[in-house]
Amino acid sequence: MFVNPEIPLEVLPRAEGVCWQALHPRFIRCLLVKRLLAAVAALLVLVLVYAIATYEFNPQIWLTVAAVLLACASIAASVAWPLVDVPRRGYAVRDKDILYKSGVLWQSVKAVPFNRVQHAVRGSGPVERRFGLASLTAYTAGGTGGDLRIAGLGEDTAERLRTYIVGKPGEPADASPLPAELGEAPVRHQETDAAQRG
Amino acid sequence: MTTGETALDVAGGWQRTSPLAVLFFVGAVVKAVLGNAMQWAATFGSLILLFRQGLPVVVAVGFVVGALIATAATLRYWFFRFRMEDDRVRIREGVFKRRELNVQFDRIQGVNLEQSPVFRLFGLVTVTFDTAGSGSREGRLPAVTPTFAESLRQRVEAVRPLAAAEHDHADAGQQDDALVRLGNTDMIRIGLTNLSVLIGVLAIPFVMQTSDYGQELWKSMFERAAAQVTGLSLLAALGVIVLGLLVAFAALVALAIASAFLRFHGFTLRPQGGVLHTRRGLLTRKEMRVEVRKIQQLTVSQGLRMRWLGRFALRAPSASVVTQQQSVEAVADANLTVPLVDEAGVRQLGEQAFADEGQGLSLLPGADPFTGISPVYIRARLLAVGILPAALATAALLPFINLAAFLAIAWIPLVAAATWQTWRRYGYQYDDHGLSCRTGLLACRVQAFLFRKAQGASVRRSPLQRRKGLATLEVVLASGAVSIPFISFPQACRLRDYILYKAESSRQPWH
């Protein structure tokens, strides 16, 4: 028969209590530069589209003004977005896994255990290299949904993290941070859900 | 045929398979041509054009096409070589673009056999093996002898002492207790619940409509039918039409049943130690071995007609090629699939797959212990899928079709009903070792997995969820992701922490 003893939940390590590491301070500037470059390209395309569209047909002035305002607003928003977004991103390396939080409106905390990482890749684009930054991607067998990507690390940090992550799985799994009796215990707490449902 | 038998003796040298493998490559070439939808349409069109040219042209073109296929197949056969090494098998293929597949035995998920009717005549089999982790395609060795296949399987299993020991143990107690055995009535059931064949056949009139010749054929059929009908009374005419429809429907169902017989005739699933062994097929016989410890999750699904029959379909994907496969057929070939199984069978399979872990998990959608999710789910979905799109559609269409645009509002109650039903279905349940999650709208699906198989977990919160203290838990497995939306935030975090703990402290390999 299946047994289900209550356990002190405080014993389980919590992902919420960790000390989040901020991304590299230069990352916001790097993203601003990238977004500005993209914005210039987008503006060029828009001007071209406008030129072609008005070649034969003359739109009303309010339509033009509205379109220009909309384009400017969305480009400005996309350039300024990292100022809001980046401070809310963060990662935490624990003994057995790595956590990454992101998102302003839709927030998420993602965790990948080291012993599930298939391989880890450090990458950096031309702009990142100028800022001395790099990104780290840890690939699991879970496909795209299971991969953990952290952009905006210092080049040195990224490389050290990569070696650390790749070196980890070789360790024996018996160095468990938890008391052994936890192995049999579930985290069952359905009353709160029942209450919420009702 | 002797080529296959000597294969092991000359281990290390590059060699070809039996010349009969040409037949395999003919099939492969034809499949490659037919596989592409555009090419298929072109073939269909050119065939219609061809038949208008008269018999000699048809014969000539047929001959040329046949010769081309035969040449392509022969070339592919000629350039296909494989080589057995101590710890790996290497396959070289490709006429213009050369490829080499290099698979270590311990990367091979399972050695599966396939035997087409012609190969059965000559006592040859095609060996298929999936490779996991490396991300490469599956390997195939066409037209080898069963002895060679068996020795390859033994070598693969010898690399893993555990699996081999279990296998020997199973052989010692040689038994014939198949866990699932499907008979002829089951084939009829599968045929009745298979919709894809019906859809395929229903599409034929539309395909015919697209070409001139098809339209003419169609018209002449109608004219002939009309000529017949005008001679009769109205009632008789109606009868003829109804009869025609019934005959067409019966033909479709018969076709579906025939395809079920082709694919699943004599389906048996036999547990042998740590391995599940399936066998199926009428003409082309397929044998498959799946190691229980490779199974990532169990998916039990029940469509409307399945529920009417009181049966379930079950899938037990392993970590291999699941995500890269496109066709339904290919996915069924790469994973353990049981097309039809009753309640007791599902329970027994669950016991087999989860061994001594996760026995508290419910695999049946009707079972009680599922905990529902928060009703806020309905509000969020209604807003995102119902109200917002309807409002946007109304606003966008208003200048063009005036007040008729408000018809888009009718979308909202539709979404509301569907969302309410989905919310009622949503449920999850877990024990010490695993979790099972029930989802579905009309059909019902239960996904169950062991915590230690998780590849990662994330907790996500939308603004609405944050206000209500809710969160979405997503668990990523090597066979896909399972997500439970709108459960309480502390509960999601606890589950996530526990799943991580289980995955990180487990000493058993996940694959």
Image (cartoon, rainbow, N blue to C red):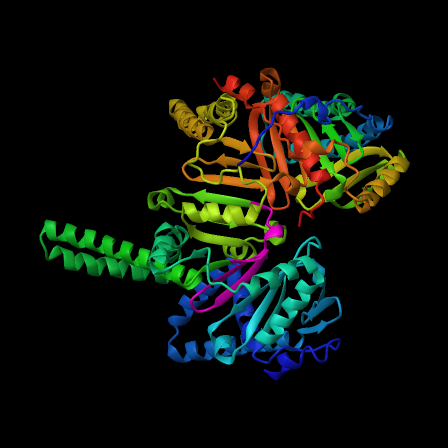
Where's residue B429, x and y in %? 53, 32
Taking the magenta stretch, the answer to whether it contains residue B295 is: yes
Q: Does residue B202 appear anywhere in the picture? A: no
> Which quadrant of the view contains residue B496?
top right
Is residue B21 rendered to the left or right of residue B260?
A: right
What range is drawn magenta here? B271-297
Q: Nearer the viewer, residue B133 or A51?
A: B133
> Which quadrant of the view contains residue B157?
bottom right
Q: Nearer the viewer, residue B154 or B39?
A: B154
Q: Is residue B299 above or below residue B432?
A: below
Q: Residue at x 75, y 37 (%)?
A: A149
Taking the magenta stretch, the answer to whether it contains residue B221 is: no
What residue occupies the far left of the structure in this picture?
B233
Where's residue A63, x and y in %? 59, 22
Is residue A55 rendered to the left or right of residue A168?
A: left
Q: Residue at x 35, y 53 (%)?
A: B189
Where's residue B127, x and y in %? 59, 68
Q: Is residue A35 above or below residue B253?
A: above
Q: Nearer the viewer, residue A181 or A86?
A: A181
Where's residue B99, x and y in %? 71, 66
Disc tally is 0
Is residue B117 rendered to the left or right of residue B55?
A: right
Q: Does residue A116 appear anywhere in the picture? A: yes
Q: Residue at x 20, y 58 (%)?
A: B225
> Which quadrant of the view contains residue A30?
top right
Q: Nearer the viewer, residue B11 or A30?
A: B11
Q: Is residue B475 above or below residue B95?
A: above
